[in-house]
């Protein structure tokens, strides 16, 4: 059974940083594409960043480019999201997701396994 467990969320002031971590088990992590999604109240779940199984390919939604960095450690089965210069608009539940990969641009249906989420709240 696949388990994805997120940690690192919290309440921070705008301009500060947070680092989210996700530990995966029950899957061949080194062969899995990984991603972070987020869902704000009343909105759909949207992709934030994705990373290929090798780590060589990454994708970021425009609103986080230059502020967020996704990384992975295939030896530890972890994927992290470093979030700098946080804005109130980044407030959401952040979800870790795993899949087999993507072609072109990653999308929600490229990822079949999901964590329970971690809350990130950014105050102004």
Image (cartoon, rainbow, N blue to C red):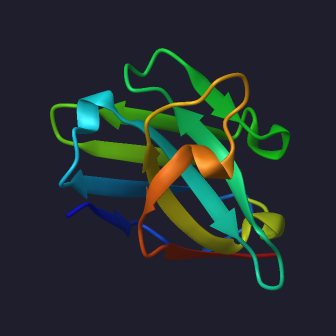
Vertical placement of residue 47 versus 119, above or below = above
- Determine the residue positioned at 83% across, 84% down: 42
- Determine the residue positioned at 26% across, 38% down: 29
Task: Give the image location of residue 26, x and y in percent.
Answer: 18, 54
Task: Give the image location of residue 94, x and y in percent.
Answer: 57, 66
User: Does any portion of residue 11 appear in the rendered image?
Assistant: no
Vertical placement of residue 41 versus 67, above or below = below
Task: Give the image location of residue 124, x and y in percent.
Answer: 82, 75
Task: Give the image location of residue 43, x and y in percent.
Answer: 83, 76
Image quadrant occupied by the N terminus: bottom left
- Determine the residue positioned at 42% across, 22% down: 55
Determine the image quadrant of residue 67. Answer: top right
Most foreground residue, 119 or 53: 53
Most foreground residue, 75 or 66: 75
Most foreground residue, 54 or 113: 113
Vertical placement of residue 56 versus 74, above or below = above
């Amino acid at each position: 059974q696949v388990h994805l467990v997120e940690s690192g969320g919290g309440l921070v002031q705008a301009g500060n940083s947070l680092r989210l971590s996700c530990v995966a088990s029950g899957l061949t992590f080194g062969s899995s594409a990984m991603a972070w999604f987020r869902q704000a109240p009343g909105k759909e779940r949207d992709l934030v960043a994705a990373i290929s199984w090798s780590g060589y390919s990454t994708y970021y939604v425009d609103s986080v480019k230059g502020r967020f960095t996704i990384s992975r450690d295939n030896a530890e089965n972890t994927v992290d999201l470093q979030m700098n210069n946080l804005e109130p608009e980044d407030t959401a539940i952040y979800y870790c997701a795993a899949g087999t990969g993507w072609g072109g641009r990653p999308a929600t249906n490229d990822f079949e396994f999901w964590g329970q989420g971690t809350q990130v709240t950014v105050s102004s």
